[in-house]
Image (cartoon, rainbow, N blue to C red):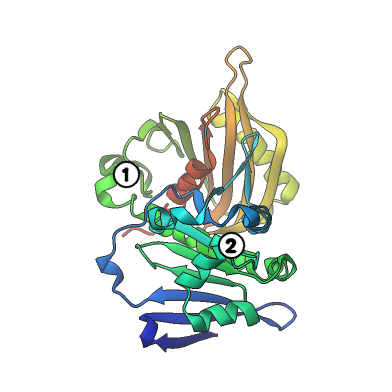
Amino acid sequence: MLKFILNSSQNFEIFNLYIMNKTITFFFIGIIFFSINCDTKREALGADNEIRVICSNIDEKIIKSYLSQIFSDTLFSPEPEPYYQLKFSTPETYNQLKKQSKVIVAAVNRDRGNPGLKLVERILPNENLKKTLTEDPVILMRNVYAKNQLFMVINAISETILNGTIQSKKNAFRKEYNDQFISRQNNYLGERDRNISLEDSIFNDQGWKMNIPWGWISIKNIKDSNFVWLGKEMPFQWIGVNWINGDYVSTMDKLEVGRYIWDWPKKFYGNIQFNDYKFNLDETSFNGSTAWRSKGVWETIDKLDPKGGPFCSYLLYDNITDRTFYINYLIHHPGNDKSIYMRKLDQVVRSINTNIK
């Protein structure tokens, strides 16, 4: 249920989003949208894997613990790499950081000299300030100072009360931040930023399309081979798509799916294999279809030329073409951030379209 309230004196709109959980109880997430037309604002600044957290030093430990439990998604590459980097700054930096894409202003310590508390009290109108103290200590806002911005305010009277919101909020917050990531990345997958000639070549030869960014090339795209292999450098990335006629997904159990995925890179790439470290196989949704998803670490077979990194694969049936598709992507970017590239690659492969007339 979505409840709409307009507070014209503060010049913003407040949406109270109530979400029902399995025990038929409700929790509250306040999402504030300033009523200023978003078209007049510029795109939010900053990297899509950074969350700028503004609080006093005395609150940093508590806030870091809380946010680390909310944003706990991790890529193993093979080293653990969080999807989001929490970057802390003191309240004096607020004006410099308020137009970043992900901003969190937080206060827990109630000392009147706490600069974080003073900042929270300054930016929240009285009505909403009271609600954070009596109803919900966390408010999530969109597009406050820029387009495609998420702006969170935490105003908790104690660490215990704040931590009591983790289980009820984390899935909804993760979805909000993931949706924002997708929205911002879609800005870079428009026609002006894509390799249209490569897209058309694949469509003419194979009968399906994918939104392929500039910089990608075809390593292998032979008509009737049922295999397309794309590559990009800086950093090194691959996408592989293979398909067979018919529905094989419904006839395979989890063990058979795992074996098929495990053997795939040797058969189609030739020089790499998957490692059993953090190898994971589960069911997920892919563009509305049920799919098997595998994540883990790949490595070169040639030990004299050691390379490796994270990979993700999908195995799914497409009823439009009556084909079983296997889609893989991977990256080699040692010593550097890989999670944001992997999330971008996931958007690219999910743009595959077989329903073209």
Which residue is the site of mark 2? Answer: 114
Q: Given the image, on which type of amino acid does mark 1 rest?
A: Glu
Instruction: Name the element at disc 1.
Output: helix
Answer yes or no: is residue 19 visible.
Answer: yes
Viewer-nearest of discs 1 and 2: 2
Answer yes or no: is residue 322 visible.
Answer: no
Q: Quadrant of the image for the C terminus?
A: bottom left
Q: Quadrant of the image for the N terminus?
A: bottom right
Task: State the residue at coordinates (33%, 54%).
Answer: 187
Q: CA distance from mark 1 to mark 2?
A: 55 Å
* Mark 2 closeness class: few <14, some 14–19, many ≥20 residues within 10 Å: some
Q: So how many labels did they put on this image?
A: 2
Q: Which labelled disc corresponds to residue 199? A: 1
Classify 296 as above or below 172.
above
Q: Given the image, on which type of amino acid does mark 2 rest?
A: Asn
- The quadrant holding residue 42 is bottom left
Task: State the residue at coordinates (58%, 56%).
Answer: 56
